Amino acid sequence: KQEVTQIPAALSVPEGENLVLNCSFTDSAIYNLQWFRQDPGKGLTSLLLIQSSQREQTSGRLNASLDKSSGRSTLYIAASQPGDSATYLCAAHSGYSTLTFGKGTMLLVSP
Amino acid sequence: DAGVIQSPRHEVTEMGQEVTLRCKPISGHDYLFWYRQTMMRGLELLIYFNNNVPIDDSGMPEDRFSAKMPNASFSTLKIQPSEPRDSAVYFCASSPSGTGRSNEKLFFGSGTQLSVL
């Protein structure tokens, strides 16, 4: 059974800092790894999807990497802004049509 | 497209009552998923449908939970009778091909916050 862990559970940084969120998964036989953002009281919004054959994906100030052999993915956020404050979840797709989610990292970027 | 639409946004009910949550997926999406989110357990998949047919309901916690998808544009999740431990946020999500293809994303609704007193 796939298990996904995210560290840290919460992170507080001043505006402008670069930061890294970590995600680890136990079963390396994945189809893809996805990163989502969740704002309070809202649903999840897909940020980046890395296919199993890829090493990284970039979207604006976000960069996600994938190392299947070690069971790890990282989400790098450059020049953080208060608007980046949210919970970030990673999810591993390791079975047809299902995703296993981590519990998320709650990020607070202070002005 | 308006995205995945869920109703109600909030539901407060008393233990023992029947609760029905509703979802309208994005038009053209073949897969629909029901998730439950709690602080303790995070996001858990309850059940998913492909072309209105339930494919995997192994995540449904008990027989008190049931889900239906009578047509491509509507699904319900019913809890009868409800219990306080059912309190959680319930999300509906849809995707074009169920993330079975390696590059397909999942689209979530805003969720239903359920409180069972």
Image: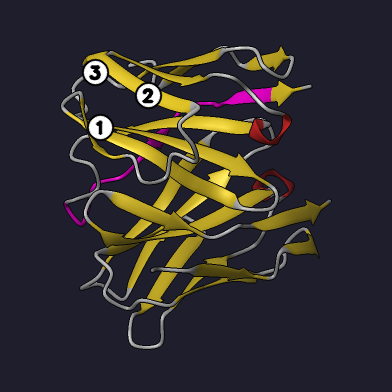
Task: Give me the chain letter of mark 2.
Answer: B
Q: Which mark is residue B27?
A: 3
In the image shown, does A34 or B86 lie closer to the viewer? B86
B113 part of magenta stretch: yes
Query: Measured along the vertical axis of the image, is residue B40 above or below residue B85?
Result: below
- Which quadrant of the rendered structure holds the N terminus of chain B? top left
Q: Earlier in the sequence, mark 1 or mark 3?
A: 3
Q: x, y percentage for residue B78?
A: 47, 19
Horizontal placement of A42 versus A95: left or right?
right
Classify 10 Å Cα crowding around label 1: few (below 14), some (14-19), many (20 and above).
many
Q: x, y percentage for residue B43?
A: 54, 47
User: Given the image, on which type of amino acid does mark 2 rest?
Assistant: Ala
Query: Measured along the vertical axis of the image, is residue A65 above or below residue B114?
Result: below
- Asked if the residue under mark 1 is in contact with the one under mark 2, i.e. CB atoms within 8 Å, the reply is yes
Task: Tell me, yes or no, whether dots 1 and 3 are on the same chain.
Answer: yes
In the image shown, does B11 or A111 lie closer to the viewer? B11
Viewer-nearest of labels 2 and 1? 2
Task: Give me the chain letter of mark 1.
Answer: B
Viewer-nearest of labels 2 and 3? 2
**Residue that label 1 marks:** B49
